[in-house]
Amino acid sequence: MIRQGELGFIDFDPSAGHEPTKRRPALVISVDGYNAFLSNLIVVCPITATPSTYPLHVPVGNGLPVHGYICVEQLAAVDPVARCYESTGVLAGEETMGEVLELVGSIFGL
């Protein structure tokens, strides 16, 4: 089962406009029940290796198999099978997830 907070790799191609491109790391932000039972989709935030001070970019954290910045403004619902999702088996830290989910809420006025 794909879990909320999981770090993995996913193929974002094809893409258009300002959407993320190529196979890259991503953070799963949808809750476990949604991931397992409610849909054939997961909601992820892509991760970029480009250093950034953009307010909607959250550092992944140290000591993890994925490095870079979580791009909260680019969250997307994707089909993990069609997009060849591959889990690292590692979850992001609690503090990182809290910051990401707070920013997601701010995007939607929650």
Image: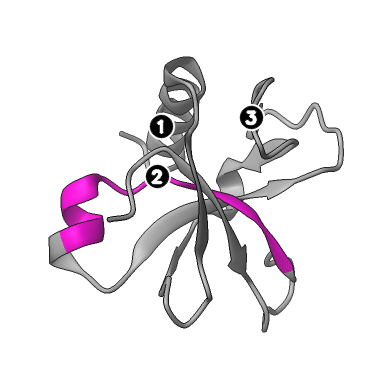
Q: Quadrant of the N terminus?
A: bottom left
Tell me residue 66's x, y (percent). 68, 39
Q: Tell which of 82 and 75 is nearer to you.
A: 82
Answer with the quarter of the image where residue 77 lies: bottom left
**Which disc, if any, is residue 64?**
3
Q: Tell which of 71 and 39 is nearer to you.
A: 39
- Magenta span has 31? yes
Q: Characterize the local packing of mark 3: few (<14), some (14-19) or many (20 or more) Cα atoms within 10 angstroms.
A: few
Tell me residue 16's x, y (percent). 70, 79
Mark sitting earlier along the chain (1/2): 2
Tell me residue 75's x, y (percent). 51, 54
What residue sits right under mark 2 in the picture?
A: 29
Q: Characterize the local packing of mark 1: few (<14), some (14-19) or many (20 or more) Cα atoms within 10 angstroms.
A: some
Single out the mark in the foreground, 1 or 3. 3
**Picture mark count:** 3
What residue sits right under mark 1 in the picture?
A: 101
Q: Please, which residue is most extreme toward the top here?
A: 95
- Magenta span has 108? no
Q: Tell which of 101 and 8 is nearer to you.
A: 8
Mark sitting earlier along the chain (1/3): 3
